[in-house]
Image (spheres, rainbow, N blue to C red):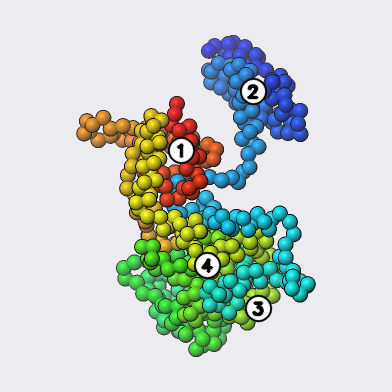
């Protein structure tokens, strides 16, 4: 295209007003969303100008109007929306951690519709406590004397140390100075409480005498942090919570544990390594136990604080509790989740436990159903064995066997030759494009890529999402 031809093409572009008068857009332009539509029209026309300058032809006005409509629809979609998790990572932090049970969703919906007794005692007819809705349940399930709930576990640890150790020393093993997702580090949270950090032992070995020799008149707390998102193996030594609590109490100190994930079930029954439970921590003598609500508990985001009644009472009165308190919707979802444990039905009703408990045979059958459906549409796919992970800073290194649906970027012609580096790069580019199309769908599908294959794990796809997943795959794979 010559410069003069390019200028002619640019001059022929319709104006914003002309685009808005197109039949596709007239109805939208007459609404209160006109300002957004005008912005979309301007952006679309600018993108078309860029294409023309790169040598492409001026598209017809129908195409421009369609592009404006598509952009407008994308801008109208909620930013936070559901996705299909086909990664095989059960507690996927980036995808919102634990999905909630149907009972939890129903409880949240019912509470959201109108007024509630959030802080009103219906029997006494006077102001009550929002924590009362889950306090008895938490104590029943864990054996704790009392309980509080905050908006997340970092907040729980922060308020606990602010109350129990501000201006004093907190002793912790160097092997437990963990960093959690998003770059948040336990030492940083600890310092924000006003406590002074005292590190003992080494990265791989900490003994009871390391804590004992570090204790001074300024020491307030011996802190135990469960390293739930990493493993140290080999030449290691650590102190049990029971021994740490006994030392603390003999010295007139407090034993506090940040349990992280907060698992109420015995994980060994599902073929996984043992994960310490809150009830075990309470029985071992911990004065305060903190853990998350949206990891292995399988509920909404929350920070749960269990412990001695006198200490919980002090924490509840601290001004920081007002800033980090749990809201009514989260409380409703958390209470419904805890009821599953009370009724001994967690493995059947809580989605993450259903996923963990799904048998290899059921997963294989599920993946084969996907493959059969895709093959019926003329789409090539295969079945491969793989591993699902727990995720969410829980049970590091632990995996569960699964069966994956695999879509290859290229077909091996049977020559026996290895693919070249250039072939591999093209394969990854093709798979990246496919993954991008899946993420751009409605609903978005998130998968993973490994060894020139796009992999989808049925373990983390909810049963009601099957139809949408297959439709998304068909749309992304069909020219």
Which mark lies nearer to you, 3 or 1?
A: 1
Q: Secondary structure at mark 3?
A: helix
Residue beneath label 3, please?
313
Q: Residue at x 22, y 30 (%)?
A: 415
Mark 2, Cα crowd under 10 Å, few <14 / some 14-19 / many 20+, is many
Label 3, residues with CA under 10 Å away: few <14, some 14-19, many ≥20 = some
Q: Nearer the viewer, residue 187 or 442?
A: 442
N-terminal-most mark, 3 or 1: 3
In the image: residue 189, left or right of residue 87: right
Residue where numbered disc 4 is placed: 343
Q: Measure the alpha-carbon separation of dots 4 and 3.
A: 28 Å
Residue found at x 44% / y 52%: 89
**Left or right of 349 on screen, residue 427:** left
Q: Residue 304 location in percent, x, y? A: 58, 68
Q: Residue 65: which disc?
A: 2
As drawn, the residue found furthest toward the left would be 416
Q: Residue 470: which numbered mark, if any?
A: 1
Sequence-wise, the earlier of marks 4 and 1 is 4
Locate residue 201, reporting x and y percent: 41, 75
Of badges 1 and 2, the one in the foreground is: 1
| Nearest the eye: 32 or 443 | 443
Task: State the residue in front, 416 or 180.
Answer: 416
2 or 4: tag closer to the N-terminus: 2
Visible in this render: residue 227? no
Camera-nearest residue between 476 and 464:
464
Find out whether the residues at labels 2 and 4 contact each other: C-beta distance under 8 Å. no
């Amino acid at each position: 295209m010559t410069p003069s031809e390019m200028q002619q093409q640019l001059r022929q572009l319709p104006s914003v007003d002309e685009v808005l008068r197109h039949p596709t857009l007239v109805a939208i332009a007459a609404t209160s969303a006109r300002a957004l539509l005008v912005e979309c029209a301007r952006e679309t026309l600018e993108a078309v100008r860029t294409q023309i300058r790169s040598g492409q032809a001026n598209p017809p006005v129908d195409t421009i109007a369609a592009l404006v409509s598509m952009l407008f629809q994308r801008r109208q979609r909620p930013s936070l929306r559901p996705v299909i998790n086909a990664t095989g990572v059960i507690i996927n932090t980036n995808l919102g951690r634990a999905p909630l049970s149907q009972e939890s969703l129903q409880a949240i919906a019912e509470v959201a519709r109108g007024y509630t007794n959030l802080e009103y005692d219906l029997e006494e007819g006077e102001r009550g406590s929002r924590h009362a809705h889950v306090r008895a349940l938490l104590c029943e399930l864990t054996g704790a004397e009392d309980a509080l709930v905050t908006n997340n576990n970092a907040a729980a640890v922060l308020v606990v140390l602010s109350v129990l150790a501000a201006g004093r020393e907190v002793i912790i093993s160097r092997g437990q100075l963990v960093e959690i997702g998003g770059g948040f580090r336990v030492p940083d949270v600890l310092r924000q409480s006003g406590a002074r950090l005292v590190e003992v032992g080494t990265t791989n070995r900490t003994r009871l005498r390391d804590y004992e020799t570090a204790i001074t008149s300024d020491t307030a707390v011996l802190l135990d942090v469960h390293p739930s998102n990493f493993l140290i193996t080999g030449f290691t030594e650590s102190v049990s919570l029971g021994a740490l609590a006994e030392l603390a109490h003999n010295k007139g100190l407090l034993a506090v544990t940040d349990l992280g994930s907060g698992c109420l079930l015995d994980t060994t029954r599902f073929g996984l390594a043992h994960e310490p439970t809150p009830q075990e921590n309470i029985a071992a003598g911990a004065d305060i136990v903190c853990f998350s609500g949206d990891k292995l508990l399988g509920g909404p985001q929350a920070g749960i604080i269990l412990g001695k009644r006198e200490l919980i009472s002090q924490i509840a009165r601290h001004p920081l509790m007002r800033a980090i308190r749990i809201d009514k919707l989260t409380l409703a979802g958390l209470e419904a989740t805890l009821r599953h444990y009370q009724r001994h039905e967690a493995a059947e009703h809580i989605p993450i436990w259903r996923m963990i408990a799904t048998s290899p045979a059921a997963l294989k059958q599920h993946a084969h159903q996907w493959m059969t459906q895709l093959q019926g549409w003329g789409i090539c796919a295969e079945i491969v064995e793989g591993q699902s992970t727990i995720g969410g800073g829980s049970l590091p290194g632990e995996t569960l066997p699964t069966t994956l649906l695999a879509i290859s970027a290229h077909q091996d012609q049977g020559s026996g030759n290895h693919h070249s580096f250039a072939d591999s790069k093209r394969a990854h580019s093709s798979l990246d494009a496919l993954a991008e199309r899946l993420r751009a769908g409605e609903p978005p599908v998130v998968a993973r890529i490994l060894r020139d294959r796009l992999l989808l794990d049925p373990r983390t796809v909810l049963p009601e999402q099957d139809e949408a997943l297959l439709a998304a795959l068909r749309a992304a794979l069909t020219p």
